[in-house]
Amino acid sequence: MANWIDRTIAAISPAAGVRRIAARAALERTTALTSPTETRERISGPGGYRGGRSDRRATSNWSSRPRSANADGSQRKTLVGRSRDAAMNLPLATAAIDRRVTYTVGTGMMAIPQLDAERLGLVEEDAAALTAQIMRDYDRYMSSKDPDAERSATGYEQQEIVLRGRLETGDILGIRVMPQAATQPGRLSETAWKLIEGDRIVSPNGHIEGEKHTKFNGVIVFGVEQDSYGAAKAYHVLKKPQQNGALGRTADDTVRIPAWGSKSPLPSSVLVMKKTRPEQARGIPILAPVLETLKQISDLTEAELFAAVMAAMLAIVYKSPGAAALPEADYGSGDIVQSDGPSPETLATQQRSDYRLESGTVLELDTDCEVDVKSPGRPNPAFDPFFQALAKQLAAALETPVEVLLLSFEASYTASKAALENFYILVRREQASLSSHWCDPHYQCWLWEQVARGRYPQIGPDFFDNAEIRALWSDVRHQGDGKISLNPQQEAKAFEIYEAHGWATGEQITAMLFGGDYAANVTKRAGEHRAWVDSGLPVPNAKGGGNAPAAEHEAPATGGNDNGDDDGE
């Protein structure tokens, strides 16, 4: 902004005034980010957050540095081994994984197609009929062993294996294959999936992690081949699982599995994992943050259990004159004896120097022997409170309420209800993750095959050519089992209010309670009602009991007898 000096100079010499104004504008642009009355602050010193300081006693030995997501996962081979061992042998680890699998998958996540009749140009009745047909066909497919390339698990059981593998190992790979009926007789559908555990996904032998591979022309990180954006192009998998006692890696011991098909937009392989950081290539076992604590809790529990067993042993030690003393170990004379046969020096001692403390053991000692029986003082009354405190820390880290983790609902109804509701927040998130990463691609690949076979003539050829149309036909929602109800009658009344005020729909309530399909329930319920009426049975009502069949107690709008004549008087 020009001042009075600039305006005066501009009046005398316009050219000089223009130069002054231009220079002043340039100066203002340069200093626009700083206040003219303030100087730039020098950023240095220990900082205001105590957690970042190293001159304090509590953090002086805390050595850490920021690393990338893949660098932090460089020890995943050890993590996977310990996590899998913990899931097999540590009760709390087993419980933590089993709870998520049981509540998330349950009996299986059912596919409910979401066909938009208006956008697909269908009549509502036709869309409903097609939805029901696709649901039946896919449920029949998932209930069979066709989805499993090994033909040892159903499609719903495969969902459990996938989720369990992701939790224990960090990730799991599903490879889409098409077994022919000639090789696997009895198949109704050729779309199948071969599951590969995450520890078999490794980079080619000799490759430096994170570097570009000269042969495949892509960056490979922990077995995941990526493009320039970091998206997975392929996965490198060991041809055979690693066995104990193996000599190590060999050249060409991996095979490259493309992530996408070359002739179709369908995935050829799917890596199911939970991504928590940008540029993260592989998943981390869910138990990774708590493995150390789990191991220590297991050691503590084992020690307490052993001490309790020792306390339960009943041993009697009594003294009697002339009894034999406890035998001592025979260590020999120390001389080297050359002998072709057994000799006193080479014979093993006939006396045992160790006595096992077993139930009902009776030991007889001489009266001159001293007896000192140690009592472990078990059960330890302080163990359970300490164990509960550690279990609460684990439960908080694993996002699982301790009541659910231990299956111990000893508090009030409100506390138990709150624990279950909080856990179902995690369950819904796990269901959404499993749906998007595994169930949706699984369904879409199956639907592609059925449409290609002409199973659904309502779906036109634009399904293969138009990605947007294909997405509309393939839209699906996966629903797991319903929630646990601690007080069904009270909760049912609450749902009645929700539905009456429009806060929830019948479909939402059905999915929440039983994991079923509301529209299918209405159709089946109508058939059941007609069957009750036709059979002359009392029709059940919401208050319990039943009314007389509608055909008997319903009266016409105007008075009259059954033959149409007026009663008359």
Image (cartoon, rainbow, N blue to C red):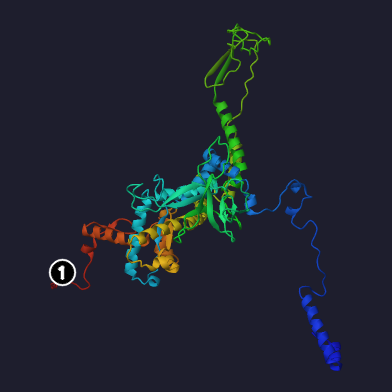
The number of discs equals 1
Few, some or many residues within 10 Å of mark 1 (<14, 14–19, 20+): few
Mark 1: secondary structure: loop
Residue 519, position in %: x, y?
35, 62
Residue 537, position in %: x, y?
23, 56
Q: Is residue 31 above or below residue 247?
A: below
Residue 150, position in %: x, y?
41, 45
Most foreground residue, 194 or 416: 194
**Quadrant where the image shows the N terminus:** bottom right
At label 1, which amino acid type do we have? Asn
Q: Quadrant of residue 370?
A: top right
Q: Is residue 530 above or below residue 91?
A: below
**Quadrant where the image shows the C terminus:** bottom left
Q: Quadrant of residue 449?
A: bottom left
Most foreground residue, 482 or 348: 348
Q: Does residue 75 appear in the picture of this structure?
A: yes
Q: Which residue has dot 1 on it?
A: 561
Q: Does residue 408 appear in the picture of this structure?
A: no
Most foreground residue, 50 or 412: 50
Residue positioned 55% across, 24% down in the render: 313
